[in-house]
């Protein structure tokens, strides 16, 4: 018996939707095996990980807090990935957005006017864009590999943040802890409801709608998709490859920067050496799990947000290591990429017996 | 000599290879349906069929590159299983591919050594190459770098590589599609010599004249089945074509070119572009005037600057001298492709999928690809007008007979001929004043080719100018009012088609028209042999 991969004539519409679901199912199966191997009852562990967090309103709210930045970053990345630019450095752009967005609350903390928050938002976006423009420039001008440059810039951004909170931006009244001063109330994003949820989630929803509209309805979106799939045909259509690279990096950098600013201003309310549990990297998984479609990304963001909350919950209730979150995210990415094959290919099982029979009949 | 050979084939010669009931499915498509084929020792056997008839599938099965779904192969009367190309070579089956499998950065002898069993010293192999290549009139310099060699010589490398393995059967897939007429004549002499020595040749071709000229037997395939076999010497090209297509091939009616030519629509003036990269071709001082109402064809062997010329005219390559290219009287050398489209020109590139169309996009999106600028209604304030694109898709697929499994499919799901009809129809639908088309019917079935050629002629007869770049001489003679030949980046003067005999075109293809090379007609046949 043999299994063949047969190319389909066209993309399968069904598989576009079903393939991420198969990937999720495979992740759960492998996760169960993993739990069993570690000596836990897989059903209990999966319940603690994925279901229990959804039973309390507190943790649902926390889920949205985590999903917000993931969705915001992933929507930007989808534009970049669709245009065939591989910005792996959203974590760095997130960090620099947070730093730039904190200039007013840390250095000009006396300014508490109505324009403070809008200015912080603009600066956060610009900070992320500025950081993303470095790999974009290097790629356009020198043809460097943007995967490497954008990834390396993540670590530089994190050291810049570390340097600032331990040095010039350290809170003078903070007992030498490596933290900036707490943000003034005028520099904190408005909350939704009673808990920690802030309007960053609304930014995410707006970004989803805006990018969906751009990709599906406008010439710019058409250009991005053409250049991503076949640059040669794109040149024939009169599109500029350099323009598309810049556009992809600026959009993804800007949205990552906005997410970073919203995280420090909405959730942490000060700068600390570590401001992200790897949102910029997890967002890559979100983008692919959502099939680079903004609406899909909305759901994928919620699921990956759940993997963070579930990881914390399982740590508390079962004593599992928090590394398990990373393992789950990694498995999910592998399966998503593997299942993508099914969109353009299908399996065909050819049995030996059948082949021999066919041969004999003729 | 030919006659004695032929009589030898008619009776009493042993069957070399026989395929019985070969069946192969790809998905739902039956590429080979119960195919039988017998090749005798020492015969040149033609395998004829339109694109997609299943020729390549059958050949790949014989060469061990594909496994048959059902059926058996007999070699000299005994059943054999050819599970991979190495097994085929061991039996004595050699293949010369249409697209060469050579490393450009290696020398001739190194390329050949790679395909042979290990252990032979390079010097010894070089001597053998020289020996064999001389014997069959295919002179080769074993030390030459492949990258420096013209296509005709590269094909010789493939043939010699095959011969060194002492094959009993050589399979040749469209061997003359890349050759000048003179190079093809040379090849035919070699093939006849091989056949007279008892080697069988399976010869796959579209070119019916050739088949009639050199083949002893022909098997004709259509839609995956064998539909007939014949002695091609007793058929006419028209009767062979009828068998291939399964009906009368639509006659092209080239109504006489009437009236005086119109204004100059395309003017190339001293167009020179340095080559990009090691294997690119430099365009040298290209001049051309193309007037409304006429079709000028650029003939030439592949890789002599055709795509560079196309890119320069279309604006995918911009040039420093704005006056190097003029479209409808406007110097456009520095203007981008959409500016040129707005002046009334349209372009159809050689590669349909990946250049002329995006494979994963539906047809209506592929209409947007080239027409979003020239049809202002397609874009309203930066937004796509998808319903208009869908209307245009219906109109074009109907008027150019694009056959699809369902409405508005992805471009990649169309067959070559149907996609080409779509890509050509998309541009002709605009009624351009200037059409530049590279390889209009390359790899397209006869029915689609006839439709496309007729559409090109009709466009020109209604006053537009057409520049056709093609490697197919039959097509060029069918279409062109004037013919120019491109060779190593230089374009010969465009002369009336009637004055351009195939011999003259062949000489120009071989470099006779190049200003810098000092070759005389007497050694024309050896031009590529140095």
Image: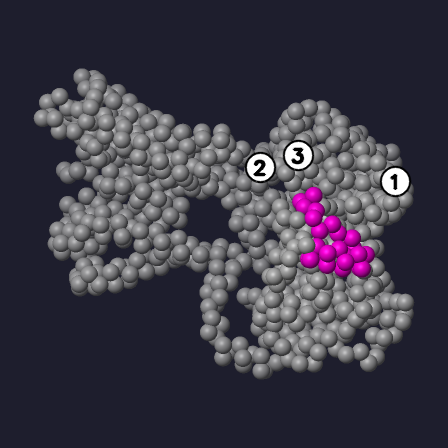
Q: Is residue A4 magenta?
A: no
Q: Chain ID for label 1?
A: B
Name the mark on residue A235: 2
Same subunit, labels 3 and 2: the answer reads no
Query: Where is mark 1, residue-wise?
Result: B520
Residue A239: image quadrant is top right
In the rendered image, residue A14, in percent from the top left (x then y), is placed at 43, 58
Q: Chain ID for label 3?
A: B
Q: Is residue B309 left or right of residue A298?
A: right
Neighbours of disc 3 within 10 Å: few (<14), some (14-19), many (20+)? some
Q: Main secondary structure of the magenta part?
A: helix
Indicate the secondary structure of the residue bearing disc 2.
Answer: helix
Name the mark on residue B275: 3
Q: Chain ID for label 2?
A: A
Q: Is residue A295 left or right of residue B235?
A: left
Q: Which region shows up in magenta?
A: B124-148
């Amino acid at each position: 018996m043999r299994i063949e991969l047969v190319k389909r004539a066209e993309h399968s519409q069904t598989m576009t939707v079903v393939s991420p679901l198969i990937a999720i199912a495979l992740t759960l199966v492998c996760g169960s095996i993993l739990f069993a191997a570690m000596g836990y009852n897989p059903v209990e562990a999966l319940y603690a990980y994925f279901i229990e967090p959804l039973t309390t309103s507190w943790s649902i709210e926390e889920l949205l807090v985590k999903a917000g930045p993931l969705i915001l970053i992933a929507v930007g990345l989808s534009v970049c990935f669709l245009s065939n630019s591989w910005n792996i450095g959203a974590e760095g752009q997130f960090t620099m957005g947070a730093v730039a967005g904190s200039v007013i609350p840390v250095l000009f903390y006396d300014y508490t006017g109505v324009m403070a928050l809008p200015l912080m938002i603009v600066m956060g976006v610009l900070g992320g864009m500025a950081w993303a423009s470095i790999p974009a420039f290097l790629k356009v001008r020198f043809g460097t590999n943007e995967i490497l440059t954008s990834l390396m810039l993540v670590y530089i951004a994190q050291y810049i943040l570390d340097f600032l909170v331990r040095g010039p931006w350290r809170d003078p009244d903070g007992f030498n802890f490596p933290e900036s001063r707490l943000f003034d109330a005028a520099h904190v994003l408005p909350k939704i409801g009673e808990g920690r949820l802030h309007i960053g989630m609304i930014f995410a929803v707006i970004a989803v709608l805006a990018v969906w509209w751009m990709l599906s309805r406008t010439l710019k979106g058409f250009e991005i998709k053409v250049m991503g799939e076949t640059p040669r045909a794109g040149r024939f259509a009169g599109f500029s490859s350099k323009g598309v690279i810049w556009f992809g990096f600026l959009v993804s950098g800007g949205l990552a920067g906005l997410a970073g600013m919203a995280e420090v201003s909405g959730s942490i309310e000060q700068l600390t050496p570590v401001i992200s549990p790897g949102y910029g990297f997890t967002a890559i998984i979100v983008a692919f799990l959502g099939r680079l479609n903004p609406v899909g990304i909305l759901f994928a963001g919620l699921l990956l947000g759940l993997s963070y909350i579930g990881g914390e919950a399982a740590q508390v209730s079962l004593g599992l290591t928090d590394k398990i979150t990373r393992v789950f995210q990694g498995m999910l990415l592998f399966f998503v990429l593997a299942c993508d094959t099914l969109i353009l290919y299908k399996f065909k099982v050819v049995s030996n017996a059948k082949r021999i029979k066919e041969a004999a009949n003729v | 000599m030919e006659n004695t050979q032929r009589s030898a084939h008619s009776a009493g010669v042993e069957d070399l290879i026989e395929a019985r009931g070969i069946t192969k499915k790809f998905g739902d498509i039956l590429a080979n349906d119960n195919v039988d084929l017998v090749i005798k020792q020492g015969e040149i056997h033609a395998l004829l069929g339109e694109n997609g008839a299943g020729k390549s599938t059958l050949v790949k099965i014989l060469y061990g590159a594909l496994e048959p779904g059902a059926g058996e192969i007999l070699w000299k009367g005994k059943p054999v299983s050819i599970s991979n190309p190495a097994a085929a070579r061991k039996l004595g089956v050699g293949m010369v591919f249409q697209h060469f499998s050579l490393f450009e950065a290696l020398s001739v002898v190194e390329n050949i050594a790679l395909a042979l069993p290990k252990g032979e010293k390079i010097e010894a192999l070089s001597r053998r190459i020289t020996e064999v290549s001389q014997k069959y009139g295919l002179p080769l310099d074993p030390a030459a770098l492949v990258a420096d060699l013209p296509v005709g010589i590269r094909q010789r490398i493939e043939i010699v590589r095959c011969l060194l393995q002492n094959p009993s059967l050589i399979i040749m897939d469209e061997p003359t599609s890349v050759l000048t007429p003179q190079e093809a004549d040379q090849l035919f002499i070699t093939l006849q010599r091989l056949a007279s020595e008892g080697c069988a040749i399976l010869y796959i071709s579209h070119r019916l004249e050739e088949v009639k000229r050199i083949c002893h037997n022909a098997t004709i395939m259509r839609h995956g089945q064998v539909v007939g076999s014949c002695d091609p010497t007793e058929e006419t090209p028209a009767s062979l074509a009828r068998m291939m297509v399964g009906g009368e091939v639509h006659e092209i009616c080239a109504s006489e070119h009437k009236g005086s030519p119109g204004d100059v629509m395309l003017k190339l003036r001293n167009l020179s572009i340095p080559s990009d990269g090691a294997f690119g071709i430099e365009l040298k001082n290209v001049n051309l005037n193309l007037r409304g109402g006429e079709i000028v064809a650029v003939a030439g062997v592949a890789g002599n600057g055709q795509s560079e010329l196309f890119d320069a005219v279309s604006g995918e390559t911009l040039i420093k001298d704005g006056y190097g290219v003029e479209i409808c009287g406007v110097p456009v050398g520095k203007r981008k492709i959409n500016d040129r489209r707005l002046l009334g020109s349209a372009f159809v590139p050689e590669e349909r999928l990946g250049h002329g169309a995006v494979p994963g996009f539906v047809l209506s999106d592929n209409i947007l690809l080239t027409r979003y600028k020239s049809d202002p209604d397609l874009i309203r304030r930066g937004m796509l007008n998808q319903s208009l694109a869908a209307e245009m898709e219906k109109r074009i697929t109907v008027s150019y007979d694009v056959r699809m499994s369902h409405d508005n499919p992805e471009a990649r799901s169309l067959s070559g001929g149907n996609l080409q009809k779509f890509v050509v129809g998309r541009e002709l639908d605009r009624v351009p004043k200037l059409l530049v088309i590279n390889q209009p019917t390359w790899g397209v079935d006869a029915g689609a080719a006839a439709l496309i050629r007729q559409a090109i002629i009709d466009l020109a007869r209604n006053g537009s100018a057409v520049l056709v770049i093609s490697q197919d001489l039959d097509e060029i003679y069918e279409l062109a009012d004037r013919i120019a030949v491109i060779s190593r980046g230089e374009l010969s003067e465009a002369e009336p088609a009637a004055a351009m005999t195939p011999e003259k075109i062949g000489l120009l293809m071989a470099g006779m028209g190049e200003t810098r090379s000092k070759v005389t007609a007497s050694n024309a046949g050896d031009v590529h042999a140095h």
